[in-house]
Amino acid sequence: MKAKDYAAKNYQTIKVVREGLILKISLNRPQVHNAFNIRMIEELLEVFRQAQLDSLVRLVIFTGEGKSFCAGADLNWMREIINYSFEQNLAESLRIAELLYQIYMLSKPVIALVNGAAIGGGVGFVSACDIILASEKAKFGLSEVKIGLVPAAISPYVVRRIGEAQARRYFLTGERVSAQRALEIGLVNEVVTPEKLLSRGEEVASLLLSSGPEALARCKELLSRVPGMAWEEAKQFTARMIAKLRISQEGQEGMAAFLEKRAPRWVKNPSPGEESPGEEN
């Protein structure tokens, strides 16, 4: 499939719309609170892989249709997998793991708009995103232990997001978490009224679009790689990265725009009187 075609495709479990430089992905099974099955996993994998290749996309907004963000695994799917062999379970679990990795490693920012409940794997989707805005009505839960399972595939992203201390509590208790508590433990970045969720997401998107696309990609690379590096490796890696960016086309344009007090070329149609990045005193 050509990168330009995927956004116009009719998917069974998700909605995909490209609005200018923004790709909006919505989980679209509101009748089951956007619970995921293997079809949704495969469709999301396709879209996030194509988004990586699509030069017209600068960022992704990820949300759910209806009252919920994602209620976790679909019950009908669970009725099927209860009879799967180890090999079948492993294959499908690896697909979930691959999807979370694709979301997390996308070189473009991903904003999650959590419009309602995010349970189990839904918390994994949230945790793999870069910036998470939640409605006051949002609820979160890592309830796998209640049915004799564990939040395995999502654990690398949840632990990175909220830290081991909080993960120990909520992995083990399976208790529900309010939007405000999610803010306190770092699972979400901001809580807003339901009416303001979309507009606030668009405001954050505007902030991101005012930044250099290559700079944003390298920021995500820093966040992914530097925490696992030894100090000497980190010194070399970070010094080389900034040196390369300073002589890159984007870096040169950004520094020139700053010195000339104008918007850089990647900012399309800035509003009258809008300040260029770095102009604040």
Image: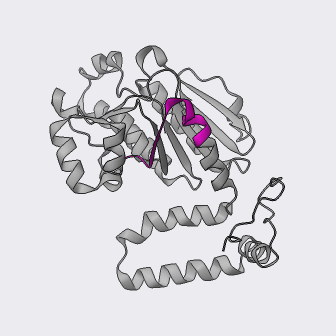
Q: Is residue 92 visible?
A: no
Q: Is residue 172 left or right of residue 211?
A: left
Q: Residue furthest front?
A: 281
Query: Is 261 situated above or below 273?
Result: below
The answer to whether residue 95 is magenta is: no
1 in relation to 82, above or below: below
Residue sitting at x 70%, y 58%: 210
Q: Does the segment drawn in magenta span residue 188?
A: yes
* Picture quarter with the N terminus: top right
Q: Is residue 157 left or right of residue 252?
A: left
Task: Judge by depth and name the residue closer to the eye, 163 or 147.
Answer: 163
Q: Quadrant of residue 249?
A: bottom right
Relative image position of residue 213 (x, y in whole percent): 67, 60
Q: Position of residue 262 (x, y in %)?
A: 81, 69
Residue shown at 35%/41% (left/top)?
180
Location of residue 193 with respect to 103 vertically, above or below: above
Residue 45 locus on image (x, y percent): 52, 38
Quadrant location, the C terminus: bottom right
Image: magenta residue range: 187-200
Judging depth in this view, the residue of 57 and 186 nearest the camera is 186
Number of numbered markers = 0
Q: Quadrant of residue 163?
A: bottom left
